[in-house]
Image (cartoon, rainbow, N blue to C red):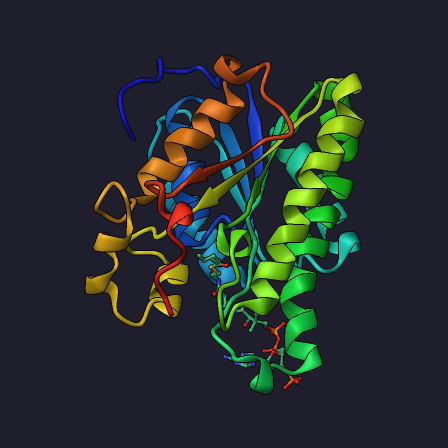
Amino acid sequence: MSQVFRDNIFAGKVVFVTGGAGTICRKQTETLVKLGANACIIGRRVEPTELAAKEIAKISENAKVIGVGGIDVRQVSQLAKAVDHCVKELGRIDFVICGAAGNFLADFNHLSANAFKSVVDIDLLGSFNTVKACFEQLRQNKGCVLFVSATLHYQGVPFQSHVGAAKAGVDALSNALAVELGPIGIRCNAIAPGAIDNTEGFNRLVTNPSNVDKYIPLQRKGSISEIADVTAFLFSDAAKYVTGTVIPVDGGMWHLGFPMR
Ligand code: HXC
């Protein structure tokens, strides 16, 4: 995390994070906790989610971090139970990160209808369900939502038709909710990571990692800390007039196209 943020800017705030045990969302959570927030991370697997929560809690002496595993974001009823647990343990929810995602490379010919649906359901329906389950808390606390999107759909990226379609939907959802929920004080934005080093997504998608830097205007891959820094900005008061926007954090790469072809 860079040192641009004041300590404890998020004291008293609670963040609810789906996919919080994964690489990008875990770093986002760690950064918010370091800046004073308490956190509830949600995952499909029980043990890795609970372990990640325990490890994140060590970052700050006073932090309360809980992990709720066994939750599939495709099931809004499961998310509703996680929200109840979070509010019981941590008192409230102010910030929501819709980060749970699924991805694999598959060409159209080998992508079954169920495979396409699985990714759309996890990424897009899962994001909708997360906001749905958190809505009363967001309304009460004039909260803020951050969707984790991608840049894949800005151009046609092969073998990613399922994820590109899902993330285009995530951007549309974010924009629509920003307009609809703005009048009741809820901000909604999306962050679109590019080639971020040491992430599950990058490792799965990029077959020739050493070749990537030259396709990025800033000439290097990004880091998970750089995604977390923009996350902290969007939740902070520095962004209190920012809603309905998608911020690519990709070193300018989307202008040239994702270099996985
Ligand atoms: C083709 C595949 C496949 C693959 C699964 N399927 N993996 N098809 N190639 N590699 C198909 C299955 O055969 C099945 O279709 C359907 O997808 C559902 O698979 P299941 O395993 O039954 O479903 P489920 O348990 O729901 O898991 C879905 C999953 C999940 C998406 C595959 O396992 C997953 O999310 N794994 C990866 C998690 C991950 O990568 N997270 C980081 C995301 S990074 P059939 O027809 O056989 O029933 C990210 C960044 C994006 O999103 C942006 C990058 C720039």
Q: How many marks?
A: 0
- x, y (%) of residue 140? 76, 21
Left or right of residue 178: residue 63 = left
Figure check: 229 above or below 108: above
Figure check: 97 above or below 212: above
Figure check: 260 above or below 60: below
- x, y (%) of residue 198? 29, 56
Q: Please indicate, yes or no, whether residue 148 appears anywhere in the rendered image.
A: yes
The residue drawn where x is 48% and y is 44% is: 192
Q: Between residue 245 and residue 46, name the one nearer to us.
A: 245
The residue drawn where x is 26% and y is 59% is: 212
Q: Please indicate, yes or no, whether residue 57 appears anywhere in the rendered image.
A: no
- x, y (%) of residue 122? 65, 61
- x, y (%) of residue 73? 67, 56
Q: Quadrant of the C terminus?
A: bottom left
- The quarter holding residue 60 reads top left
Figure check: 39 above or below 77: above
Q: Between residue 74 and residue 193, name the one nearer to us.
A: 193
Left or right of residue 173: residue 239 = left
- In the orientation shown, which residue stands out farthest toward the bottom? 110
Instruction: Give ligand 1's quarter of the image.
Output: bottom right
Q: Quadrant of the N terminus?
A: top left
Q: Between residue 137 and residue 245, name the one nearer to us.
A: 245
The residue drawn where x is 39% and y is 38% is: 227
Left or right of residue 89: residue 19 = left
The residue drawn where x is 31% and y is 72% is: 207
- The quarter holding residue 112 reads bottom right
